[in-house]
Image: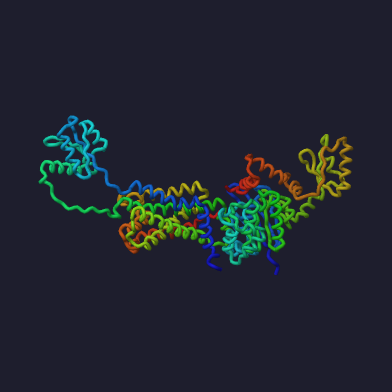
Amino acid sequence: MSFRDRPLAQLFLARWRELVREPGVLFWVFGFPILLAIALGLAFRNRPPNALAIAVVERSADDPAAASVAAAIDAVDGFAARRAEAAAAAELLRSGRALLVVEPGEPPRFTFDPSREGSRLAEIAVRDALEFARDPATRLATLETTVTAPGQRYIDFLLPGLLGMNLMSGGVWGVGWALVLMRTRKLLKRFAATPMRRGDLLLSFMLFRVVISLVEALFLVAFGILAFSLWPRGSYLAVAAIVAVSALAFAGVGLLVASRAQNSQSAAGLMNLVTLPMFLLSGVFFPAGNFPDWMQPVVKALPLTALNDALRAVILDGASLASTAPQMAVLGAWGAVGFAVALKIFRWT
Amino acid sequence: MVEPAAIRTRALVKRFESITAVDGVDLEVRAGECFGLLGPNGAGKTTTMEILEGLQRATSGDVELLGLPWSGHATELRARIGIQLQETELYDKLSVEETVRLFRSFYPRPLPVDEVLAQVDLIEKRAAWVEKLSGGQKQRLAIACALVSDPELLFLDEPTTGLDPAARRALWEILRKLRAGGRTLLLTTHYMEEAEKLCDRIAIMRKGKVIALGSPAELIARLGGEEIIEIGCEPPLPAEAFATLEGVAACLPEPGGFRLSVHELHATLPRVLEEVRRRGARPSRLATRTASLDDVFVELTGTSLGADEAQAAAATADPTSDSKRGRKARRDAAEPGR
């Protein structure tokens, strides 16, 4: 019997044909992640930071004291003065449109909220600017080198997270949904009436996800390079290995979710129940380390956290595959346990 | 050595929570015969089938297929039987040929794809996607998937329900050829005509029990008469007007008159008409025909299977296709456990 005629190959092919012959599904698998990355990329693209606004109180329309303070502030890179009457200046501060209010005088009065990010910085910079305006000799000469380092921008943090999130949704939904549909269409029952080994069907879904996940990852990594010059610092093979093992993990979760569900509504509910906590806890949009210590064991045991950590280590820090062993172990365990348990409790009819 | 029976069940019982779907069924299907399970919706046909197919476990009782029990021989039995389920929907996006190839891969000694497609007359449709097939073609594909294993025993669960008459006749032709090929066939149907045309022997089921068993001819002979007279009179006459006449084996009331089961139609019909005249009435309706399984069913259960069907159809008010209506009705009846 040729390899093509083996049950596993045939089941895999059936799954493959279902996908490629349904253009709508293709879009959701490949197009959507890219669109999402583009949208987020636009939102977080690198641009010069907005000048920080400093309100300068003026007593009349052309208050010379206010004009000279404002000129001193405008001379500093990254700061812009806005002249306003006292009440308006207070309003600018209150509403967050100014970081600091300067009231010219001897000595000038600074009003600010120290709990706001950057307000201390603004205070120091403005004081320095006013000192410099009075006596240029106070300026310390410095040398400046500016850099833009891929790996430290928000988009660099975000892209591996997005890749992880897509692999999770694709795995859990792709496997779970298709299986529940096969159950409601009695196709699983029909298969159960053949001598097909039960594990072959489940395995075909896992292998299918490995292939699809690799293609998805290829698209997103290429997108990161083209759109954001985010060249992975670690090896591509390491990225592929992590993606492949994570596909097994999420397919395993998908199998578990689909193993008992009798209809698509309850399956959809279960899948949301499984994926939503991971969206929040697993460090897609912000580091999972932000959660308190007592939650960390749970957070770290989630497959998406393991995947995101491993991807970021390899892509951003250039870590070796070997150094991601703990994360790979978590992912492998989800895949193996998911498969074994699903096979045990799977409902065929 | 005597060839073992293809199927043997003893005291088969299946209970779902409060309903007893199968209530003590004993069956013996001989190797090479075509055996029909007949009955109205909810009679327990499908449940019985699924227990035989190893898809459901009986609450009690024994099942043997090809001389083997299911426990311990499941893989072997699954390889030796072929199954068409009532409402499997195959992959929409796979072609006919790809679907057969998929099922083929599950079996140790499968038949070539071409041979199977030829048997169900789907050679020209081999490249068509499943979603593009008509109801009859889909059903033939389902049968092709049951045939790939080169099964000794073939289970067909209502293979023609929901098909239009032309598609039904085409399928009968295919099933007749399969029968001639020496396989054992077990089929369920609620079409009497189908059972009469295809089956060597029939078990009529009602409320989980087998209420009659035999060849179609035997069952009809049990009526006591080979011919049927349907008669209605004006003014209406009582049953005893006909029941005692010579040549009348049975007299069953039906709407607007009686259904007489008679011997020697040529002699009995004049006696019936003479009696009507003698009682000062005249026939408002008169028809004669050969007795059919449907008459057997009416005799046994007091209702006609055809009437059952019409009721099920009328209950579904939406103007969907015949096939959907049939399927809906069956689904409601076939799963008492839900």
Q: Is residue A160 left or right of residue B206?
A: left
Q: What sort of colour scheme is used for the picture?
A: rainbow
Judge by depth and name the residue closer to the eye, A72 or B244.
A72
Q: Horizontal and vertical percent for residue A93? A: 23, 36
Q: Horizontal and vertical percent for residue A180? A: 51, 51
The extreme top residue here reads A60
Residue shown at the point (42%, 54%) measured from the top left: A167
Residue shown at the point (57%, 60%) measured from the top left: B102
Q: Is residue A32 left or right of residue B218?
A: left
Q: Is residue A121 left or right of residue B162?
A: left
Count of marks placed on residues: 0
Q: Is residue A97 above or below residue B22?
A: above
Q: Horizontal and vertical percent for residue A75? A: 18, 42
Mark yes or no: residue A253 visible.
yes
Q: Is residue A176 left or right of residue B50?
A: left
Judge by depth and name the residue closer to the eye, A140 or B156.
A140
